[in-house]
């Protein structure tokens, strides 16, 4: 058996971290914002640092439009479709459970059913060209518009009391990522699980009166390593930390 990979110096809890400025591109319904999507195993949190806007969500609770303003925090559990909406210079810090998994594919756009049913077609639309130039922007807008097209149908049905299309989208998303699960498990073991296990070992050491691990105390610092990338919800500033943001290309 090969040794478990290790991720040196993760952020607390092995969370993911990025900063977003919400897109101001107008969609088919007249709303400016990002690409609706869900995560399969990650809870995501928005910490609003500036501007105004909202996050629209679809879940078994129905359709919600949650206001966002400086200081507010919103978070959504796996399976919740979310769409960031621009209200005016909206800026957020994103905290993501299970760092590394979203970049490894734990996010599925609300594309129409025929696209979700074809993995190659899905990948062709979901994957952006490298860089932050005009070609990448055009591809990001096409991706957003296709996700909104599927999302509006899901929302309309859910508001009308029909949760069937939303539930089928969840099932289609799960089918689309199934082959990636073994790799996700490796990332989870090396990141979030390992962080929790370290805490358990430290508690054991304290209970035994042998806190030698405190001799390894240190501090770390970092800064964004890419600015203005095209994320799912907006322009994204990213940190290339082990287990936090994988090499660019996951979005």
Image: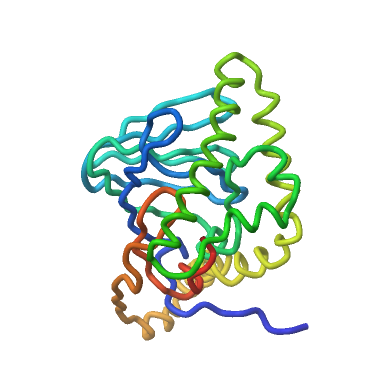
Q: Quadrant of the N terminus?
A: bottom right
Where is residue 74 drawn, in percent x and y?
38, 39
The answer to whether any part of residue 70 appears in the image is no
- In the picture, measured across the screen, residue 39 lies left or right of residue 92, that is right
Q: Is residue 45 left or right of residue 112?
A: left
Residue ID at (52%, 68%): 249
Residue 4 visible? The answer is: yes
Residue 158, by quadrant, is top right
The front one of 111 and 79 is 111
Q: Position of residue 203 (x, y in %)?
A: 48, 67
Q: Residue at x 65, y 63 (%)?
A: 184
> Residue 187: x and y, percent?
61, 68
48 w.r.t. 205: above or below? above
Q: Left or right of 182: which side holds 109? A: left
The one of 145 and 81 positioned closer to us in this rendering: 145
Q: Position of residue 41 (x, y in %)?
A: 60, 50
Residue located at (58% from left, 55% from top): 126
Left or right, 203 with respect to 229, comes to right
The front one of 11 and 160 is: 160
Q: Nearer the viewer, residue 148 or 247?
A: 148
**161 shown above or below 189:** above
* Residue 152 placement: quadrant: top right
């Amino acid at each position: 058996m090969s040794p478990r990979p290790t991720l040196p110096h993760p952020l607390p809890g092995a969370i993911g971290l990025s900063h977003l400025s919400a897109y101001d591109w107008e969609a088919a319904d007249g709303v400016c914002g990002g690409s609706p999507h869900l995560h399969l195993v990650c809870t995501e949190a928005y910490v609003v640092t500036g501007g105004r806007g909202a996050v629209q969500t679809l879940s078994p609770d129905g359709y919600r439009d949650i206001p966002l303003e400086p200081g507010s925090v919103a978070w959504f559990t796996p399976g919740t479709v979310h769409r960031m909406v621009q209200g005016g210079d909206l800026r957020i810090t994103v905290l993501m459970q299970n760092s590394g998994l979203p970049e490894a594919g734990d996010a599925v756009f609300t594309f129409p059913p025929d696209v979700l049913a074809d993995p190659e077609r899905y990948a062709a639309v979901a994957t952006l060209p490298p860089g932050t130039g005009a070609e990448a922007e055009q591809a990001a807008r096409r991706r957003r518009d296709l996700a909104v097209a599927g999302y509006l149908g899901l929302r309309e049905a859910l508001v009308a009391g029909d949760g069937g299309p939303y539930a089928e989208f969840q099932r289609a998303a799960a089918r689309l990522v199934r082959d990636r699960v073994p790799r996700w498990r490796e990332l989870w073991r090396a990141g979030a699980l390992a962080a929790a296990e370290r805490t358990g070992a430290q508690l054991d050491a304290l209970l035994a009166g042998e806190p030698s691990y405190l001799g390894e105390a240190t501090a770390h610092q970092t800064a964004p390593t890419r600015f203005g990338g095209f994320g799912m919800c907006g322009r994204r500033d990213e940190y290339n930390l082990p287990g936090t943001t994988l090499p660019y290309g996951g979005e």
